[in-house]
Amino acid sequence: MAKYANPPQPPPLFTGTKDSIVADSKSLCDRTRSLLDSLVANIKPTENPASATFDAVIRPQIEDENESSLSARILGFYQYVSADSALRDASTEADKIMDEFGIECSMREDVFRLVDAVYSNSGLAASLEKDKNRLIDDALAKSAGLEDVESARLLERERKSYIRNGLGLPEGPKRDRFKEIKKRLSQIQIAFQKNLNEENGGLWFTKEELDGVPQDVLDTLEKGTGDNEGKLRLSFKYPDLFPTLKFAKNPETRRKVFIENENKCNQNVPLFKEAILLRDEAARLLGYPDHASFRIEDKMAKTPKTVLDFLGDLKTRLAAGGVKEIEHLLALKKKDHEARSLPFDGNYYLWDHRYYDRMMVEQEYSIDENAIAEYFPLKSTVAGMLRIFEELFGLVFVELTPEDRKRISPTGKGEDISWHEDVIIFSVWNDEGEGNGFVGYLYLDLHPRPGKYGHAANFSLQPGFLKPDGTRRYPATALVCNFSKPTEKKPSLLKHDEVVTLFHELGHGIHDLAGRTQYARYHGTSTVRDFVEAPSQMLENWCWTPSQLRSLSSHYETGQPIPDDLIEKLIATKHVNDALFNLRQLHFGLFDMTVHTPKTHEELENLDVSKLYNDLRVQISQIKGPEAQGEPSTWGNGQATFGHLIGGYDAGYYGYLSSQVYSTDMFYSVFKSNPMDPVEGRRYRHTVLEKGGSQDEMLTLEQFLGRKPSTEAFYKELGLDN
């Protein structure tokens, strides 16, 4: 392994202090501002039209952006992972500074005039004027006098972003108002996410009330003193929440936990409402009928109608299956309540679902998810996943030991290249067949801690790009998850759905590592939102393939792989209650589209968002909420815990479902017959993953599939191909 000992590029440092994080964000902004000022001062297209070229105007800006991205993303990352609240606050402040500066730049008329002049001088303006729907491909880029697709796409998008940022509006009150809205939306996003990260609520329960919850979970809960003597405190973090909803025998406990979890962040309720109102106002200022039309125009779907047709069609196809699944689960509930002499009112409730879904799988498929988890200790499962990626994509992952960290750290201190002692770091390389070169760094931060981001996500810490001298800058990417911590008796064990989550997020990480674009802006996962999930969703299929499950597994005591009969049973459950699962995704997607497509602004002002969220859920999923017990529809505020819709997936949540169409198509067409085909794996790496957002994603898909994508495999996989 000596050839992998010394990466050609040191890893990033995480030595920020509360003062340096804020100061660094300011100096990044200052550097960019002075560059823009000097471009405006020195290039005068009105006097010399030929001076507005791509190399003179765009390239210096993109090189500055590439360089800035190396520290900007890390400055904003501390707020999600730092154990020190002062650093988290400083990181939030830095994000705010950089966001506000971004808005200032995006509305600079003087810079827009330069970019517009470059666009007009290139042949792009004329070609796209003739055919507005034309995809930018190599031929168009060359005919427009630009060297490649990525540069042509960058120029077209850059010009359009100024117009989308209000520079198509006349100077004066309208444009000023637009700018004000952008600033406020940025503040809302930061505050909303901070409230979610810092959320620290919980409920005290007696041991009896938590009957059925696995002992492993109970062992990790805070023990009460004083008034709470003899009780345990359950937080709303996933490792506490999900096992309780799945295993607590007492329906009242589950009800309480479910309702309190939907109300854990009520300070976000007014922020959510304000955000959707401001988005609607901004879209109307720009001449769009609503925010969704504004957002979807540049995505693969192009129009809200395409999205609503797709979601509506899916809802129609899934409805009957959902009703059937509920009838079956309700019968199970009735039997269970009779056996335990519990009152039964004939309803199937939201807080019943995880419990009876699990019971059904256990009883009818003889599967015990805790028994399966014994075959998936976190450490060896991660190692197994990385082996799959090595074989498929021609990569090599080398875990950095404390000595390695010290040796390659720019400061000579191993702890400086990580933000917390829990973090595992890998240097990533190409194998021999791929040329042995360095690929980048991968970080895994896998366990919950106070103040840490509460879901599972992949964060791009430093993108890759081409430096001015033609050499490559390599990426660094981090997986931030919340799997249960090891105890004295047991390592951290993953339930199968957690294995799927880990594989999914690692899929984003690999997308990030495999990126080979010229510009940071299009690196890795920087694709349109309705495609970005497809590569990682496709990789989830490996978690349902017998040979892969076997190679991933290793019993935490015996080291034995998972037995074939268990694999068979597990795979048989893949589509159990699938209609209900997809109807839940549809609820999120349709709620998102509904709040972003009001007919009028007044309609939105009068909208009771919580009522809509809860009513839509009952209507789409058909599962009853507290309304069926006489509560008003405003019993919960789920939208206030829904970070996606404030954090970039607005009018884009449908992307999880539409990406599934593309991912299933890719898997069925190319990998289903042989998931470990290294030739296809490498073709996928180079055709899809490497491209990032550097060309139109539809073009990427067509190049990989050899045809236009189709929904056939998606519906077939869901059993809806009739």
Image (tube, grey):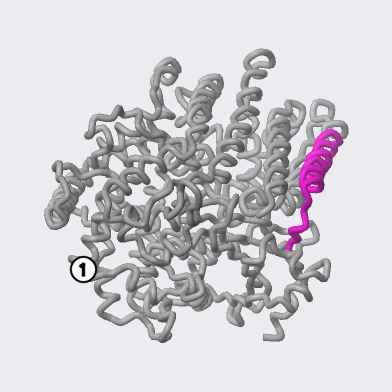
Q: Which residue is mark 1?
A: 365
The x and y percentages for residue 393 are 52, 73
Q: Which amino acid type is marked by label 1?
A: Tyr
Does 439 appear in magenta?
Answer: no
Q: Nearer the viewer, residue 469 or 243?
A: 243
Vertically, is 418 above or below 79? below
The x and y percentages for residue 658 are 38, 48
The x and y percentages for residue 29 are 79, 39
Vertically, is 58 above or below 573? above
Residue 578 located left or right of residue 594: left
Confirm whether residue 110 shows in the render.
yes
Q: In percent of the image, x 68 and y 32: which residue is there?
A: 103
Q: Nearer the viewer, residue 342 or 651?
A: 342
Q: Nearer the viewer, residue 693 or 235?
A: 235
Q: Which residues are magenta?
A: 12-38
Q: Nearer the viewer, residue 52 or 110?
A: 110
**Count of number-bearing discs:** 1
